Image (tube, helix red, strand yellow):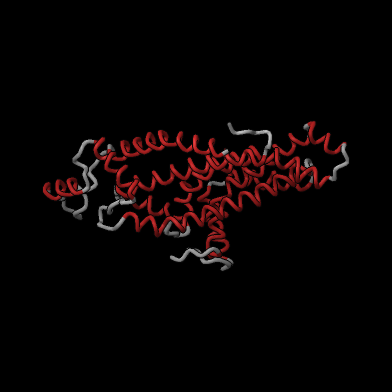
Amino acid sequence: MGRYAIRRLLQLVPVVLGTTFIINYMVWQLPGDPFAGRCGQRPCPDSYVAAMRDQFGLDQPLLVQYWNFLKNLLTGNLGVNFNGVSVASELGDAWPITIRLALMAVLFEAVIGIGAGVLSGLKRGGFIDNVVTISTLFLLSLPIFVTGYLLQWLLGVQLGVITPTVTDEATVPELIVPALVLASLNMAFTARLTRTSIVENLRADYVRTAVAKGLSNRRVVAIHLLRNSLIPVLTFLGTEVGSLMSGAIITEGIFNIHGIGGLLWRAILDQDYTVVVPVATLLVLVYLLANLLVDLLYGVLDPRIRYE
């Protein structure tokens, strides 16, 4: 597995280079000048715009800009944004909050989604199966922003169970409801995918063999059925980590969470590409590493898989 992991990491290098180059190209080629409207209602002097473009290297060719970005990225020197604030410090303040929110969302997806899917699959056609099916269809029919505003209004304004907005500390108890909102769609997908996988594997020959050998139902489900049924679920959860990070923009906006989503949104509105590019690159790296971790976990769930 060690050689396989190293080979996969090496395969990620051209992917990272290609995606970061595309991000830089698309961002720096957007219409408009980020410095032209930074002088209030009056247009900025040409000398000011030229000086700012020179300071941030926007007057250089694209390949030179990209090379400078890679050097700064590898050395950890992300420079300052258009307002003179350190980009690394902004990421350092926002990143832990979004990581905490995303990990809680993944935990809810795994525990509630897989748990509901397993119960639904084992009790196919019964009361629990109908409840899970109806509940997941309801969640899938609601966009995240509708779910977020609904829970914020109901639990925060009407019942007073939670604070409508999250404080700057963004403690774990404060992030429970936002994490549920962020996980709502994926949690429903996870439950339905788990149910389908459980139902399919219940008819498999290895399950019949395990039952014929006299193994208890608990052992058949825990040892044999779950390991094979969770492989497609694990793939889905791994690929959805990146979407959780990007989907946090909506959730963080609803609950006033000062994380990566809010930072990226403000940077896009301000056309502050010194922040947009590093944040987008960070999201790409998270997505790629999550998929690599999923590939490595395949061998744990299915011993038949061998890495060469």
For the N terminus, give its image quadrant. top right
* Residue at (35% x, 53% y) in the render: 266
Q: Where does the image place residue 70, in percent across and percent down from the top left?
A: 32, 42
In the depicted structure, whether residue 163 falls above or below residue 150: below
38 left or right, relative to 211: left
For the C terminus, give its image quadrant. top right
- In which quarter of the view is residue 88 placed? bottom left
* Residue at (38% x, 50% y) in the render: 264
Q: Nearer the viewer, residue 57 or 12?
A: 12
Q: Where does the image place residue 214, in percent across and percent down from the top left?
A: 88, 41
Q: Where does the image place residue 179, in percent across and percent down from the top left?
A: 55, 55
Q: Nearer the viewer, residue 144 or 235?
A: 235
Residue 268: in sight, yes or no?
no
Residue 29: in sight, yes or no?
yes
* Residue at (14% x, 49% y) in the render: 51
Q: Nearer the viewer, residue 174 or 2?
A: 2
In the depicted structure, whether residue 12 falls above or below residue 96: above
33 left or right, relative to 276: left
* Residue at (51% x, 56% y) in the render: 101
- Looking at this view, name the residue that lies furthest to the front: 3
In the depicted structure, whether residue 147 falls above or below residue 32: below
Q: Where does the image place residue 240, in percent across and percent down from the top left?
A: 54, 43
Q: Nearer the viewer, residue 265 or 68?
A: 68
- Numbered-mark total: 0
